[in-house]
Image (cartoon, rainbow, N blue to C red):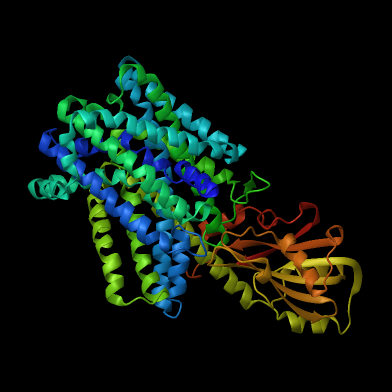
Amino acid sequence: MAAHAGLTLGALGVVYGDIGTSPLYALREVFHSAHLPVTPGNVLGVLSLLFWTMTVVVSFKYVLLILRADNNGEGGLIAMLALATQAVKSKPVLRARLMLLGLFGTAIFFGDAVITPAMTVLGAVEGIDVYAPAYHGLILPLTLLILAGLFAFQRLGTGTVGKSFGPIMLVWFVALVALGLPQVWAHPEVLAALDPRYAIDFGLTHKTIAFVALGAAVLVVTGGEALYADMGHFGKRPIRWAWYGLVMPALAVNYFGQGALLLSNPEAIKNPFFLLAPDWAEIPLFGLATLAAAVASQALITASFSVSKQAMQLGILPRMRIHHTSVKEVGQIYVPAVNWALFAFVVVAVVFFGSSSKMAGAYGVAVTMDMTITTILTFFVIRHGWGYPLALCVAATGAFFVIDVTFLASNLLKVPSGGWFPLAIGIWMFTLMLTWKQGRRLLSDKLREDSIDLKSFLQAVFVSPPTRVAGTAVFLSGEPGITPNALLHNLKHNKVLHEENVFVTVRHHERPWIGFDRRVEVESLGNNCWQATLHFGFKNEPDVPEALALLRQHGIQLDDMDTSYFLSRDIVIPTIGSGMALWREKLFASMHRNAAGIADFLHLPANRVVELGSKVEI
């Protein structure tokens, strides 16, 4: 019970940071975006729309349905993609299409990772306009200063601050209730909005305006994807307990409190959240809101590191340098290239849009696309993976699909006014991913065409063997059974062969975890030579020396001080007609050239690595 309580507290900080800070701007933006007059009927209709959006999308779709689709305990779009593609592996055309869809969903996530920190921090700092409008000019500089500190902090790791996420957000959710409850108590008529008929009547009465309002109403569920993505960190039960026990009630009370305030004072639509606070609480609330916004931003930044690492291991992003910020927690990582790229785009977003109201035009497009893609992939998981009847699968996902598409269609109206920004980031990331994946395939095909069968080559070598030198040589190869270029270079230039030779191929699989009992496959090639295949899940740490230590179980003793690692550092030369446009070939060549060294990525000891280059035309 104590363990569950601790996980529930942690879930408050990491999982619910984004959705927990939506009261800062969500209700206000529904009225602003649709230019709705603040009348009692509109207030009750919008409140009902927000409440039932939260209930259907988060409580029903994510908490009850999507959390069931775990991949060995892990969640998130990449985990769902792995489940869906495995479920239809006997249908190659469908599998390829789902892979493209999942890749686009993963790419568009980065657009959300840019907009969310900018929106949440800017929305919190805009409290200055309510409490001290004379200092309006400080909003942008203060926002950029907070964001700069947040991104600079990442290199130190999230372990220390992560422990404080839960308590901070616990105080935040309690504050949401404390702010909203007095207004609800004073104006209980606002509770009529719990009746879904108010949302229906609002839609039927306003039609086009209500459809536009949906684009802002989605702000109350941004962060819903985090419920699924962070399932592996906390488990289903703590996430569900936190949502039903505190998060949803706190959000509902605060939204209804803002609505009650608008019923009595329509002018409060300027910033209903901060105007809920009494005079004595203004400064503490401003500080707490800013801190909560930073927590929400931190969660998305950390998630972007995790998604990037998983994408690298699945071969859909080039290798980047990864720093591990904890000796105990493998999930605590820092990816400098991702961190500073995000920061650059966040700065552009803050400066370009200038206010959270204008930024709301960019918010929601990426989120609703990811929600729609998740629903589509869920259908294929429960239909083809779990084998449920077609009618049940359609019923389980069809209603959510209609809702997701409706929200997506509404948000697409924002594309001219700012929605193009995260969409452009997503399309560029999708282009990079597709180019890297396709380029790697072309490179692999080219190397395979020019390759020499390893067993045949070794048989020929040992007819008249070269001089054997002490120690063990580990040759890394992309394909098992193929003679590595590094071995050919070593024999050509050094005219020697080590006493023991291990030919290693690293395999990354579309599943999160692969245990040590299935980590290594070994085949003896004779003459103290072995073929070893190392298996890693996309959430496993690809630590080659650690995995090779398991070879002792097969009678192969590796001495760390007497083992050398030979790598082939290929130089890619783009050529016309390889299967990609020339500009994409050049892009792949540039990505390949600038990718982090394979030695770093596979945790090879730098002082024991020998890189031998070769040129490959694709």
Count of marks placed on residues:
0
Q: Position of residue 366 (x, y in %)?
A: 35, 50
Residue that appears at 39% across and 26% down? 140
| Residue that lies at the very extreme toward the front in this rendered image | 1
Residue that appears at 64% across and 66% down? 515
Q: Position of residue 557 (x, y in %)?
A: 84, 68
Q: Position of residue 381 (x, y in %)?
A: 40, 70
Q: Position of residue 571 (x, y in %)?
A: 64, 61
Q: Please tell me in which quadrant of the rendered image residue 63 appears.
A: bottom left
Q: Is residue 407 above or below residue 401?
A: above
Q: Please tell me in which quadrant of the rendered image residue 115 appears.
A: top left
Q: Is residue 551 left or right of residue 50?
A: right
Residue that appears at 45% across and 39% down? 297
Q: Is residue 238 left or right of residue 46?
A: right
| Residue that lies at the very extreme toward the top in this rendered image | 134
Whether residue 115 is visible to the viewer of this picture, yes or no, is: no
Whether residue 570 is visible to the viewer of this picture, yes or no, is: yes
Residue 362 versus residue 221: which sits nearer the camera?
221
The C terminus appears in which quarter of the rendering? Answer: bottom right
Residue 281 versus residue 550: which sits nearer the camera?
281
Q: Is residue 112 above or below residue 269?
A: below
